[in-house]
Image (tube, helix red, strand yellow):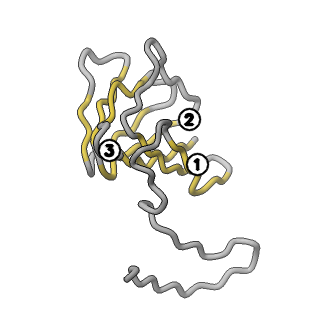
Amino acid sequence: MGRPFFLSCRTDGPLMPTCANLFDEISPAATEEEVTPLLSRPGLRIERIVSTGQASPPGFWYDQDQEEWVMVVSGAALLRLAEEAEPRRMGAGDYLLIPAHCRHRVDWTDPMVPTVWLALHFA
C-alpha cells in the first residue's frame, strides 16, 4: 500500500502539485550513475543521484560555479574535498555544503547497495 499524501493548494499558473517518491525506479544493477532532475528553477536545481559502485574518474575533480548541498539518503560513499587529506565517509542522513569552486570528487560508492543522493545546486 502506498503512503498517503494530502495536498490542498491553489495555483494560478502552470505550476501544479507534484507527488513522487525518491526511491521509485532505482535499478540496483545499473552500470552507470543515474542523475534524475527533480526541480529546476532560475538559481536552483534539485537532483536525485543514484550510484551503484561508481566513482569519479581518476584525476577528475568537480569545480562548479554554484554551491551544492548534498545528502546521502541511503547507501554509503567516500567524498573527497581537494584541500583535505582524507575523504569524508558519508552514510544515510549525512550531508555537506560544498561552496562554489570547492574542488571535490567521489572516491567510492557502495557497490552492493545503491547510494541515493539528494543534491541541491544553487546560486
SS type, badge 1: strand
Query: On the picture, is 74 further left or further right than 46?
Result: left
Residue closer to the observer: 105 or 26: 26
- Image quadrant in which the N terminus is located: bottom left
Amino acid at pointer 1: Arg
Residue 96 place in picture, x, y as percent = 34, 40
Mark 1–mark 2 CB contact (< 8 Å):
yes
Query: On the picture, is 9 further left or further right than 76?
Result: right
Amino acid at pointer 2: Gln
SS type, badge 2: loop
The outermost residue toward the front is 29
Query: On the picture, is 97 further left or further right than 92?
Result: right
First of labels 1, 2 by sequence position? 1
First of labels 2, 3 by sequence position? 2
Q: Which residue is mark 3?
A: 95
Residue 13 place in picture, x, y as percent = 76, 75
Q: Residue at x 56, y 35 (%)?
A: 66
- Image quadrant in which the C terminus is located: top right
SS type, badge 3: strand
Tell me the quarter of the picture where residue 59 sits.
Answer: top left
Tell me the quarter of the picture where residue 8 sits.
Answer: bottom right
First of labels 3, 1 by sequence position? 1
Q: Residue at x 45, y 21 (%)?
A: 103
Q: Residue at x 34, y 16 (%)?
A: 83
Q: Residues within 10 Å of mark 1 (few under 14, many from 20)?
A: some
Residue 3 place in picture, x, y as percent = 39, 80
Q: Residues within 10 Å of mark 3 (few under 14, many from 20)?
A: some
Q: Which residue is mark 1?
A: 45
Q: Nearer the viewer, mark 2 or mark 3?
A: 3
Q: Which residue is mark 2?
A: 66
Q: Using the numbered discs, state the Cα–Cα distance from disc 2 to disc 3 in whole angstroms.
A: 17 Å
Q: Nearer the viewer, mark 1 or mark 2?
A: 1
